[in-house]
Image: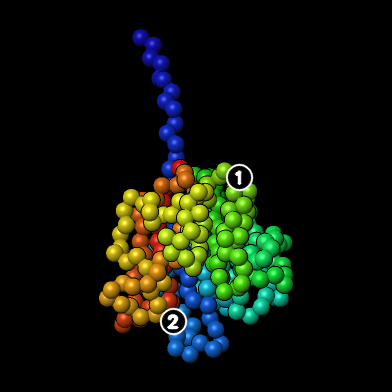
Amino acid sequence: MLLIAASLPESPVRVMTSVMTYNIHLESSSEQARPWDERKAMVAQVIHSRSPEILGLQGATLGQTEWLEEKLKDYASYAPTSQSLVMGTDMCPILYSRSIYESVDEGTFLIGEAIEKTESGQASDNQMQFLNWVKLRHMASEKELYVLNTRIDLDAGHDKFAITERLKDIITELVDGETFMLLADMAHSPESAIIRSISEWAKDSEENSLVSISDMEATQPGWVKRKDHSGERVDYIFLSFDIPANSYEVLDIDHEGEYPSDHLPVYCRLRIQ
C-alpha cells in the first residue's frame, strides 16, 4: 500500500515578548530632594527586576541615558544624538534586547507647533519633544514591529489636541498597517478626551489585557509611597489592534517608602502574531 503524507498547513508563529515604559524623572541641576546620583542605582534595579525585552524611557537626559546604557549591557538602544542638544533635553530612548531583536530602521520626529521629521542626529530650534521610533526584527521568527516612544510636555504651550492628532497622522503613515506599540507619558488620565481619541487607532494595554497583575493603578503617585495608592495613570503602552496583551502590571517598587522616580514603570507581556 502506498502511503501519501498529506501536507498540513503551517500554524502561524506567535512570539511572546515583554515591554516596559518608565519615566525616570528628568535630571535637573536644581534638583535637591532626589538628585539623580542618589536614585539611579535603584532605577536600574527596577528595570532589572523584570528585564523587559523592549524598554522605552521618558524623563531621560543624555547623561541619564548614557549611564543606563552602561548598566544595561544586554540592550542595544536608539536615541537622537547631537552635540547641539540643549542640556536637560528629554531623549526618550528606546532600548531592546540585543540577543532577541535587531533594528531594521529607526528615526526621530520633533513634536512642536509644527511637527517635522529630522535627519539622524539633527536637532532644530523647534520645541524638542521627541517621538522616537525603531523598527525591530525578532531574529528567531523574523517578525517585525514598530516601537515608538514619546513624552508629551503640556507645559510647552502647544495645542495638545493638535499634537495627538499629528501623532496619529505620523504613526499611521509610518507603520502603514504593520504591527506597532507606542510607549508614552501622555500627562493625561484615561478618561480624558485626548486618551479616548487614541482609542480610535490604538488600544490601551491596561484595558485590553487578559490579566492585571498589580492592584496599583496610578503610574504617577509622586515620590512617596501612599497606602491609598493615590495618583494618576498617565503612562501608557498603546498597541496596534493585532497585538494581544497577556498581562499588565504597574511595578510598585519602593525603598523604605520612597520611589526612585515620581512615576512607576508599566510592564506588559504581549503576543506578536
What's the mark number on residue 176?
A: 1
Q: Is residue 109 left or right of residue 200?
A: right
Q: Can you name the residue that lies furthest to the top here?
A: 1
Label pair 1/2, CB-CB below 8 angstroms: no
Q: Which residue is mark 2?
A: 39
The relative height of residue 263 versus residue 50 in the rendered view (above or below) is: below
Tell which tag, 1 or 2, sits nearer the viewer. Answer: 1
Residue 261 location, quadrant: bottom left
Residue 180 locus on image (x, y percent): 53, 50
The relative height of residue 101 versus residue 55 in the rendered view (above or below) is: above
For the residue marked with disc 2, what is the amino acid?
Arg
Q: Nearer the viewer, residue 150 or 152?
A: 152
Q: Indicate the secondary structure of the residue bearing disc 2.
A: helix
Q: Indicate the secondary structure of the residue bearing disc 1.
A: loop
Residue 2 location, quadrant: top left
Q: Nearer the viewer, residue 5 or 153?
A: 153
